[in-house]
Amino acid sequence: MLRRGLNRLCGGDEKRVDSRTIYVGHRPCPPTEAFIPPKFCDNRIVSSKYTVWNFLPKNLFEQFRRIANFYFLIIFLVQVIVDTPTSPVTSGLPLFFVITVTAIKQGYEDWLRHKADKEVNKYPAIRLENGQRARTYSENIKVGDVVEVVEDETFPCDLILLQSSRDDGTCFVTTASLDGESNHKTHYTVPDMEKDLESLSATIECEQPQPDLYKFVGRMHIYKHDQETFVRSLGPENLLLKGATLKNTKKIYAVALYTGMETKMALNYQGKSQKRSAVEKSINGFLLVYLSILVSKALVCTSLKYWWQSREGQDEPWYNQKTQKERDTYKFLKMFTDFLSFMVLFNFIIPVSMYVTVEMQKFLGSFFITWDKDFFDPEIEEGALVNTSDLNEELGQVEYVFTDKTGTLTQNNMEFIECCIDGFQYKNRDSCSELDGFCVTDGPISKLQEKAGREKEELFLRALCLCHTVQVKEPGPDERTELDQVDQVDGLDQVDGLHRPLAQAQEERGFIASSPDEVALVKGAMKYGFTFLGLESKTMKIKNRQNDIESYDLLHVLNFDPVRRRMSVIVRSRTGETMLFCKGADSSIFPRVKQEEVDRIRTHVERNATEGYRTLCVAYKRLSPEEFAEAEERLQEARLALQDRDEKLTAVYNQVETDMSLIGATAVEDRLQEEAAETMEALQGAGMKVWVLTGDKMETAKSTCYACRLFQRGTELLELTVRTLEGGRRREERLYELLQDYHKKAVQDAPPAKPGVTRSWATAQQEYGFIIDGATLSLVLNPADANSSRYKSLFLQICQNCCAVLCCRMAPLQKAQIVRMVKNCKGSPITLSIGDGANDVSMILEAHVGIGIKGKEGRQAVRNSDYALPKLKHLKKLLLAHGHLYYVRIAHLVQYFFYKNLCFILPQFLYQFFCGYSQQPLYDAAYLTMYNICFTSMPILAYSLLEQHICIEVLMDNAILYRDIAKNANLRWGPFLYWTVLGVFQGLMFFFGVRFLFSNPALQDNGQVFGNWSYGTTVFTILVFTVTLKLALDTRHWTWINHFVIWGSLCFYVFFSFFWGGIIWPFLRQQRLYFVFANMLSSVSAWLTIILLILLSLLPDILLMVFRKPKTHVRQKKPRLTSAGAPKSPRASARPLLMRTFSDESNTVC
Amino acid sequence: MMASSYNAKEEDGHHSGAVGPGGAGTVKIKKPDNTAFKQQRLPAWQPILTAGTVLPAFFVIGLIFIPIGIGLFVTSNNIKEFEIDYTGMEESSPCYVCAHNYSWNNTTPCICLIPFVLDQPFESNVFMYYGLSNFYQNHRRYVKSRDDSQLNGDKTSLLNPSKECEPYRKSNGLSIAPCGAIANSLFNDTLELIYNFPNGTTITIPLMRKGIAWWTDKHVKFRNPGGNDNNLTTAFAGTAKPLNWGKPVYELDPSDPDNNGFINEDFIVWMRTAALPTFRKLYRIIQKKKDNMMPTLPQGNYTLNITYNYPVRSFDGQKRMILSTISWMGGKNPFLGIAYITVGSVCFFLGVVLLIIHHKYGSRNNNADIPN
């Protein structure tokens, strides 16, 4: 929404001034014209909320905007103004405490934001000033500055490329942190740019900043000395975006165009709106209940008071006369102030301190996430990061997980796994480092047979080496790179598991390609002895196994496109042979080759696909000179066509790529993140629905889903993509038809799922997976005809019944759209988004909980996330252990707080019936104030930080336990009612127990009597002990801290009472508690009553616990049973994917 | 089980630690501390309440509570208590006239005599209480209408009492000492106990007027201005007596300087506001006879001699005189004994029920677990 607002804002800007003019290097051009330096915002990124100066007023304002705080402020003011039973201190002090603690917390968080901003803003940059390179910071860059950026640096703002160190005026850029595409993109300098930037005088006229990453329109006026003016048009290919990284180019010079908050990256920020957890919503619900209890109590008391006073002699008996002022007060005003007084008297029922305790619990609790060493990743040497502590408990409530694919599920790191040549399988196993390198076939069958003929092998490898668009990176000047290269070439075989990450990093330097698959293939060929040495002026050089250099003339590249799903090259070898090599998806290759060849390879391809590998088939064709001549002619013709060029080209391509012979297939693995499959399985086991949202192709995404076991072999896939919609008829109709069809299948025919159990391991129930792509999704979400909003509900219903949903070809904003759609659907489920790139930011911000992976693609996602993790696998512990515990803790915290304040205030309410509804407080003011702050706050805080009702290992091993707390189970009205009833019961016990005791107030053995303060203190003592012991009963995890805090606060209460009653406090007007506590303890009856009432109050709880125990008991035992008995438990699949693939299954298949 | 999981984790830590040094030396700086607290692995006692653990507790509680309850009940029953209402609401009551002809301005005290019979002798010390009903000493306006610093002998407060005392703060420009509604409404009936010997002679039973207030109240909380030894008349110079009082505060007990002024025990007792609208306050103590041969109050006929000053009719109040012996648990109150016996029995009963459940279903539960 904010984004839309921003857009609108931008739109408004554009209307006002539809373009901006930038003077390159701030040089007036043409020199004669008056130079008015235009004002643009500076290059500072500001994500912080406060400054030192506005912190106090702004923070106070924001805090009092919270209903609860405002309520307490009102109560405080009422106490100050109206004559109320309790002094303003009793509510003022806690409120002050709350406000201060919250302010400190928010201040701290803002300080962290300041720090993060500073890190970005103080990023060193180099600016050209009068021809000199001047070091400066990113924040100092102004629009029009010429900036130097060196390799692997990120651009400090949006820039127009002026000059590159590369000869061809290009530079390579990876926008991984912006849109998640990690391939290298080529950007171009402005054509005909002068070499000497110093003498360049030019202006750039361009549109106002707008958030679309791929749109940019502008033009550059270059003024030459001879007053000749060039105009060059500028497009997105000239624009370098802030956040992108310069690759493979030593340095560039560029002029700053948009800075600071006007950069496309900043405009793509969605303002971080305050996320509120479901628990907070529950709290607000409970708060309303308690508020109504409070108001009704006050109303009851007020009306009873006036009824009681209306009886003769009660309102103003001779012994207790009113002041003249009181008598004169207008009656209704008096009633109103009485009502307010009762409100004040009972206001403790709404616990001020709950907010501060909740805040503290969240704040301190989040440290346990940062501290968790299981989240520490030795590779990046970082642990988890908590950006918002408000959502800890939400981690225990997740129902939908939206995950990015590239970089999140997968490492975006392709690896050549195996190939199949002419029906024989070749695996890239470590053992293939036998000198021959390329001999290992596997399985008994292949051992019997000979491997494919050497020619075929070599042909296949040559095809791999030739059929691509990979570039070899020029070895840099520093020796290390060269060494690496050498190492790469002939040291590869020694690469073992430990070295792999390092080696991969080196390998990546070697090749640059638009698709990581191609690099993987080239590398794969290299392992088998064929090394691609590079492309020089249309000649491709290959080093073959005999270490001879073969060179081929590259005649044509038939580019890859997603419709054809294949690419080809036409090369001519030194021997004069013209060959066409083609590689592509099986579906696009198989129809173009001979059937018998297909049959030999098909099983391999299919098996590889189900294993989650990306498979490509390789085919070739020898072209006779005539054929080639014809093809070339037609290609030229198509290339020069002015109209329908693409269609014509495709037609030619299709014609050329026929009658090929299949030589083999490859399998490339986009390596999954460590334990990705286990994590996904655990999440599904925990009842979460996993949706994969990716910008990637459907096939790759699908194979990843298989690899992650989101889709399983038995899963029936419901596809809703552009391809399935192609049916001749209108797409809308077809869409509706399909939706209906799927809906029937997945929703209507499915047996009604047992509540709470969405996917169980044992049932053989048909599972559905759903696949939709971006284009179709936009049809569903934004249907052309207005009355088709039914699509959306159909779609949602289908999705809810599918175990996993795959959305591919998503734009970043579409991801957010999906999240929003699910978030707002019936039952408003809790959503979690996890991603690592800037393209995931929108979805991270949209979801209830956003998780950033500290991946390779920059820090964007991390910065915008609520929690950042080093690896996907950590998600399991974060949700299953931390989330679960935090939820249980905070739920208990909230319920306990309401409960303890209910039984705190109920006796006070009941006392009104015995004191003539006069608002006489039962407890002393000190007790009223300190009850929540000191006597009962620490134990629950410790509990809410340390409790582990089920220990972490069990939680991790049994994802199913997560379902116990699903749908806010512990904060529903049921548990709330239980706690409330318990509070009422105990309140009644306290009050009436002591009431019966005090029917004869002579409680000491010297016959002396106790007064009202003794009464209150007795009730209060019972209350404090009961409430604390109740917590002790609930504590399942007694660490020394719990012991210390629970027994400590009881001791503190006793000591405080002695202390408070032991001294005449000169600053107090009333010494009403003087020795009350000590006297109470000198009475045996009081002791006996206290013990009895504590026990009696706890009895129902103990009983319930004992009777309920069998269930929980089983729960504690169950884990072992299920993991031992059920073969399909998550444990079973815990073996690494690679191992599983290569050990048993490949044998059986072959 | 806990221990084993610990070890496993410890090893985990070592493993990663062993891998770590392969990288850089900075690993240790950023790596979260592997402390038990930070890893949420503090050694913990994990109690689980089961029927097995709770059962003995129930029995123990039952076994302890029932005897205590019986003891309390017996004790309470042994306490002798005699109560007589002398409000004078019925015409038959000797105090009827006093109750109805009451006015504050009466100079001549109205005296009424109520005869009563004690069926049983009262042994040991006997405590004499007065009881009031429907008297809201715990009304907020009333409770706060006092000035503790004035009562503590503070000179400035004596002459300038707290505003809380309104409307009993000043009288004719002079500040009232002691100020406030509580002090103003001091119970001022005088009760005397006369024993009628069977032979017709009467004897006024000596009543101790000291030892009825809390020691701390008498010695610390309440003090006369300028110390207790000074001449109280001068100490209270410049103050007025409370409106309803017949005499100023320094004449409450002229016979005993240690019981006069603010430290008059009747006054202190009254100042401790009662918790409930029906209450009793200690009035006098009848000490047991020295020789121990005779009961403190032998059975027989008595007369209660009341100087009826305190009006309660206007607010439907009642006045009582209570004679009671005291035990270690205080005055007569059957509640505690009954409550203890009840709770003890309930616990015992629950214990039995739990035992049955435990035996009947507990084992079956265990069996049922395994096939699952």
Image: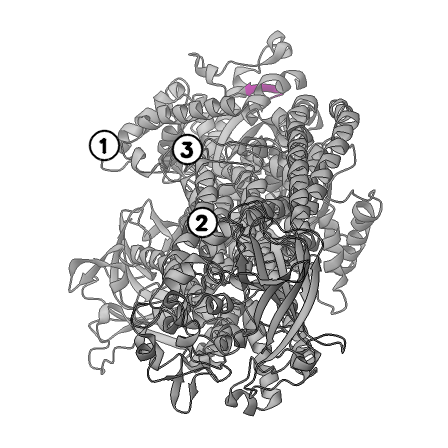
Query: Which residue lies under the disc numbered 1?
Result: A479
| Front position in the image: A170 or B213 | B213
Q: How many marks?
A: 3
Disc number placed over residue A45 in the picture, else none? none
Q: Amino acid at mark 2?
A: Val
Q: Residue at x 38, y 80 (%)?
A: B161
- Residue A916 position, x and y percent, is 63, 73
- Nearer the viewer's eye, disc 2 or disc 1? 2
Q: Amino acid at mark 1?
A: Glu
Query: Which residue lies under the disc numbered 2?
Result: A1054
Vertically, is B331 above or below A233? above
Secondary structure beneath dot 1 equals: helix
Magenta span of residues: A422-426
Q: Cβ–Cβ below 8 Å for labels 3 and 1?
A: no
Q: Is A1100 situated left or right of A4 in this image?
A: right
Which residue ends up furthest to the top in the rendered image? A448
Name the dominant secondary structure of the magenta segment.
strand
- Residue A188 position, x and y percent, is 36, 56
Query: How far is mark 2 from mark 1, CA to CA?
Result: 75 Å
Say which quadrant the N terminus of chain A sits in.
bottom right
Query: Which residue lies under the disc numbered 3?
Result: B36
Q: Quadrant of residue A598?
A: top right
Q: Residue at x 34, y 78 (%)?
A: B233
Query: How far is mark 3 from mark 2, CA to CA?
Result: 32 Å
Circle 2 chain: A
Residue A6 on the magenta span: no
Q: Is B362 situated left or right of A435 in this image?
A: right
Q: Are labels 2 and 1 assigned to the same chain? A: yes
Residue A425 on the magenta span: yes
| Front position in the image: A527 or A1005 | A1005
